[in-house]
Image (cartoon, rainbow, N blue to C red):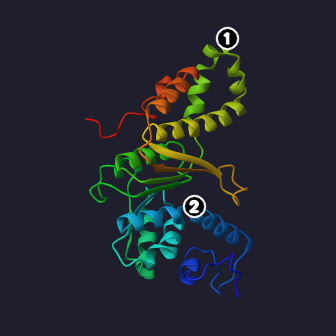
Amino acid sequence: MSNTHEIRPGQSIELLKELHILTRDGKMNQDSRRKLKQVYHLFQFIEPLLQEVKAERGRVTLVDHGAGKSYLGFILYDLFFKALQDDSHIFGIETREELVKTSQALAARLGFAGMSFLNLSVADSITSPQLPPTVDVVTALHACNTATDDAIRFALAKQARHIVLVPCCQAEVASVLRKHKGKLLAGNPLTEIWRHPLHTREFGSQVTNVLRCLQLEAHGYQVSVTELVGWEHSMKNELIIAQYKDLPRRRPAERLEEVLERLGLEEMRERFFTAPVSAA
C-alpha cells in the first residue's frame, strides 16, 4: 500500500501512470516521488482558493499558462474539479502544438471533460474568443522570462480573483540594469549591489519579482510571497499568490515608480503598468 503522503485518496492511478509519476506496474522512483511532492505542496496553496471561488460563485474557471505537459492542470482536475457537478473548467495555454495535442488526447482518455487545451501564446490568449471574458484563477508555473508578466497582464485583463505564480528565469530587468550601470555607478553606492555580472543577474531576478508584487498591489490585490518546499533542486522556488481585495492602489503605484527611477529602469514602465487594464 502506498504511503498517504505519496498518493492522495481518490487520485487517479491511471493519470499518475500517464504523467510518468508512476511506472506501468504502479511503482514510484525517487524523481517521481519528488515531482508528486512538489505538485501536492502547490495544491495545498491552490485548493483553498478554489474552494473560496466555488463557495461564492458555484463554479470555478482556471487558466494555466505555459502549461507544458499540464501536470498541474491534470492534478488539479483530478483532485478537485472532477468531483464538482457543475460547468467548472480548466484551460491549459501552451505554445507547443505537440504538447497541446498530447494533453487533449490524455484528457479525452481519462474522461476529463472539463479540460481544454489551447495552442496560443499568453499574449494572444487575452483576446482569444476561445476563452471566457473573465476567469477566477490564473496559474503560471515556471513561465520563462516575460511569460510570467504576460500571465499577469492576462489575469488583470480577465479580472482574475486569484493569481498563482512561480516565476522563472527572467533576464530582461538584468539586461536593462547592465545597460545603465555605468551611468548610475558614479552617483549611487547602492549600484555596488549589481556591479558584478552574477549579482546583476540575481538582483535583476529579485527586482523583477518585487516589481511584479508592487504591480499587483497597484491593481488592488493582496500579495503574499512564500517559498515552495521540496523544490530545493530548483533555484526558482518562489511562490507569489495574489488575491483581489480591491485594496488602495496609490501607494504601491508610487513605490513602483520610485523603484523604477532609482534603479534606472524607467523604460520598463509599460511592462509593469499600474493603470487599470480596461481604462479607455
Q: Is residue 99 visible?
A: no
**Residue 212 to residue 61: above or below:** above
Q: What percent of the width, then of the height, locates residue 38?
A: 65, 64
Percent x, y for residue 107? 43, 75
Q: Residues within 10 Å of mark 1 (few under 14, many from 20)?
A: few
Residue shown at 58% from the left, 37% from the top: 210
| Residue situated in front as seen by the camera: 59 or 11 | 59
Q: Is residue 194 left or right of residue 99?
A: right
Residue sitting at x 26%, y 56%: 129
Task: Tell me the quarter of the image containing the N terminus.
Answer: bottom right
Tell me the SS state at disc 1. loop
In depth, the one of 252 and 269 nearer the eye is: 252
Name the disc covering residue 271, or none. none
| Residue 111 visible in this rendered orientation of the protein | yes
In space, the residues marked 1 and 2 are separated at their CA atoms by 44 Å
Question: In which quadrant of the rendered image does the C terminus lie?
Answer: top left
Q: Amino acid at mark 2?
A: Phe
Q: Disc 1 marks which residue?
A: 186
Closer to the eye: label 1 or 2? 2
**Residue 45 got which mark?**
2
Answer with mark 1 or mark 2, whichever residue precedes in sequence: 2
Q: At which x and y percent is residue 132?
A: 30, 58
Q: Which kind of residue does numbered mark 1 sit on?
A: Ala
Q: Residue at image x 67%, y 30%?
A: 200
- Residue found farthest to the top: 186
Residue 191 vertical position relative to residue 119 in the rendered view, above or below? above
Give the crowd class for mark 2: few <14, some 14-19, many >=20 residues within 10 Å: some
Residue 62, image quadrant: bottom left
Query: Residue 164, percent across and down?
Result: 52, 54
| Left or right of 134 on screen, residue 257 | right
